[in-house]
Image: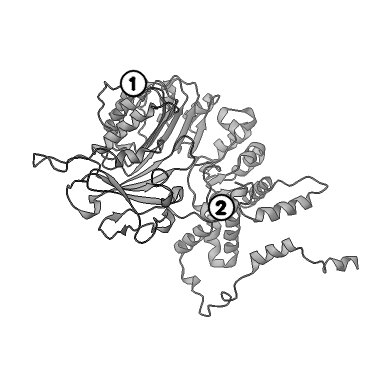
Amino acid sequence: MGFMKRFRRQKSSKEKGFLHRSFTFPAAAAGSYKGPDCTPRLDDQILRRIFEEVCPHTADETFDGNEDSGNDGCMTCDMRDLAHCALTKRQWYGVAAGLLYKSIRIDAVHYCELEQVYAEQRRRKSRGGEEMDPPTTRLLQLCRTVRDNHYIGQRVRFLKLPYMLRESCKADLARTISVCPNLEYVDLPDGFYTGDSTCHTLRQELQARCPHVRKMKYHEGSEQMLESLMQGYWQELRVVEISRVRIEPSVLRRVFGTLPWLSEVTFANLQWLDDTVFHPAPGIPEFPPLDTLKLEKIKNVSAQGIAQYLSNPMCRDTLRTMTVVESPGLSVASLHIILQAASSLQTLEYTVTVSTSLPIDQSLPPLASATLRTLNYEIISDSAKQMYPPGESYYQYLTNSLMSSSLPALRKLYVRDPNFPESLTLAPPVRPFADSPHHTPRGFNQPLEVFSKGLDELEWIFTSIIPADAYTGRRGSVSGGRPLSSYSASKGLGPQWGGEARKSIVVPNGFGGFLAVPAENERPRSAGQLSPSHGHSMSNGTVRSSWMSHGGREKRGSRADLWR
């Protein structure tokens, strides 16, 4: 009787609620389609695109770590759904299995409500015994799968692991990657990048079994690892990060000379690095052309050294992205030299903390570039509590550069000044016509997306600025060159505009000022109520700017915030 009681046990209300939410389908949806099965007509390319939507992280081919490459939703549940697709039809197996093992991601928890259910089940099973660690179990299962089936191991190209898993399971990770010859990126423990002896076996396996690795880091203590690249390891490296490494500049140039596919280099905290690393020298390979160059806390590299590097036409035509973080040798006053030399630069990220204002007796040329499309101009005042923070003069310099039309291709701007959009809308008006018929009016005349925030803010405030004549095609008027701005109504417009939750339209009034105009017959709409791709016209013919969602697509709803 005791055995039969198990079959008559009533389910708890919590289990009933979970089963009802997970497995109950609407009655109208069941059996609504009675026609033939059309899925055999889908080719592999269409199936692959559908399965990428089922499990988005399988399409992740970036070299970002597990912590930086997450997608919205629950990645573990998405992988489970893709595995079910692989078992649904024989036609789907090849495509789904190929995605399932191409970009593998192991997470510590479920980023959904299932984590509560599974955590409770694991807690009950572990009573009186050792508690199971889900990430370790998943890595062991992956290791067994790829070692039993070498065909699956050959499909693995990206392997992303949580921090504690890669730090505590170095031996299991080494056994896993030893049968993945086409691996391009894997999350490694911190000791691997510093020459730690505990990662010796893992390093040997990665060097011997994975020749297609594309990204590697070299931190303090890994000088021998960096020099070992001259022995032929990892010749397909694309991304190299070097931090606190003590090495001769000539050796560094020889190492770079053995990497024909190198496209991105990061230098951080290198006291010995100076302009001479870019200079030509007999018997030493030239500094390679790069698509991305990042300098973080580099004191001795100047704008003249960057200009010397860009004097090579191949380097000048290749460089697309440059990042400068807290590097005193590359001051704001010398940025115009870099922009003038980098004729193909499209993205510039510049971050610096300043304690003094720009000198008033120094006439700086404006920031000018015909190709720059994205600018991160983050000037941080180390004494923000002053009445006149020193960063204001730097943002005024940027405003003058924009008003002089020196950055015509710029479309996205990030600043650490919440009041910067006002400096564009409240700038002095520009004369629409000049005495000479060949004179070109100067002023702000380009659409621009401005993302601003203060030092105590976490989210970027989005402001879309569109010139008044961008759509009407009219030439100068009293307000010619003055922008039409979709302005965040967090300050100055009063509570009747909805405060921080709503945004308003700021338009020229024709007399050197601006008016806040609400939507027709209603209060101003928030960003989520406007069309993401189309503008809205008002009755007076002025075009209202459109609101764009962050990240290029709507964020998927999830209850994962509890465990993120």
Q: Is residue 27 above or below residue 239?
A: below
Under circle 2, the secondary element is loop
Q: Of the residues shown, which amino acid type is indicated by label 1?
A: Ala
Q: Which mark is residue 281?
A: 1
Tell me, yes or no, if residue 463 can be seen here: yes
Residue 44: percent from the left, percent from the top?
47, 63
- Left or right of residue 302, residue 481 in this image: left
Q: Which mark is residue 101?
A: 2
**Furthest-bottom residue in this view:** 34
Query: Alpha-carbon neighbours of circle 1 within 10 Å: few (<14), some, or many (≥20)?
Result: few
Q: Is residue 446 above or below residue 540?
A: above
Point out the image quarter for the N terminus: bottom right
Residue 164: percent from the left, percent from the top?
64, 39
- Left or right of residue 514, residue 475 in this image: left
Q: Nearer the viewer, residue 112 or 254?
A: 112
For marks 2 and 1, give the CA distance.
46 Å
Q: Which mark is residue 16?
A: none
Picture quadrant where residue 524 is located:
bottom left
- Left or right of residue 166, residue 522 in this image: left
Residue 344: percent from the left, percent from the top?
29, 38
Rendered residue at 56%/74% (across/down): 29
Query: Alpha-carbon neighbours of circle 2 within 10 Å: few (<14), some, or many (≥20)?
Result: many
